Image: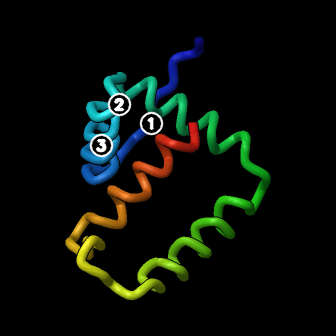
């Protein structure tokens, strides 16, 4: 392995630490996994997928079981991310 230093803003650090804790891994391991996932994707594919997710979010009418609280979207996407692996 090669050591690499990167600068993260406060939000990135907080979100990485939160996700790493949820998955029971270190921040460094999470960064390696995220980089691997990004490198596996076809160029431009990530932007198209994110655009589709952004466009479709909220398209289904809200029912009693659907949470629209702050952070619900991010939590849902994190759950999908874990299922994908």
Mark 1 or mark 2, earlier in chain: 1
Residue beneath the point at 59% across and 11% down: 1
Label 3 Cα crowd, 10 Å radius (few <14 / some 14-19 / many 20+): few
The residue at the point 30 percent across, 81 percent down is 63
Q: Position of residue 39 (x, y in %)?
A: 70, 40
Image spot of residue 51 (x, y percent): 60, 74
Which residue shows up at 39% across the image and 88% down it?
61
Q: Left or right: where does residue 27 sit relative to residue 81?
A: left
Q: Are marks 3 and 2 in contact (CB under 8 Å)?
A: no
Residue 78, horizontal then vertical, whole percent: 41, 50
* Residue at image location 73% in from the left, 40% down from the top: 40
Q: In 3D space, how far apart are the residues under numbered discs 3 and 2 (Cα atoms)?
A: 15 Å
Q: How many marks?
A: 3
| 1 or 3: tag closer to the N-terminus | 1
Q: What's the mark number on residue 23? A: 2
Q: Which mark is residue 41?
A: none
Q: Label 1 belongs to which residue?
A: 6
Is the residue 4 above or below the residue 13 in the image?
Answer: above
Is 81 rendered above or below residue 53? above
In-front residue for pair 17/63: 63
For numbered disc 2, what is the local secondary structure? helix
Q: Quadrant of residue 68?
A: bottom left
Q: Camera-side residue: 18 or 82?
A: 82
Q: Which residue is mark 3?
A: 13
């Amino acid at each position: 392995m090669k050591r690499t230093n990167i600068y993260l803003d406060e939000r990135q650090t907080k979100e990485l630490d939160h996700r790493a804790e949820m998955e029971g891994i270190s921040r460094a391991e999470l960064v390696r996994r995220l980089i691997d996932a990004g490198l596996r994707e076809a160029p431009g594919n990530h932007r198209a997928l994110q655009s589709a997710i952004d466009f479709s979010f909220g398209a289904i009418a809200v029912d009693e079981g659907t949470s629209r609280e702050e952070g619900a979207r991010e939590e849902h996407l994190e759950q999908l991310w874990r299922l994908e692996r």
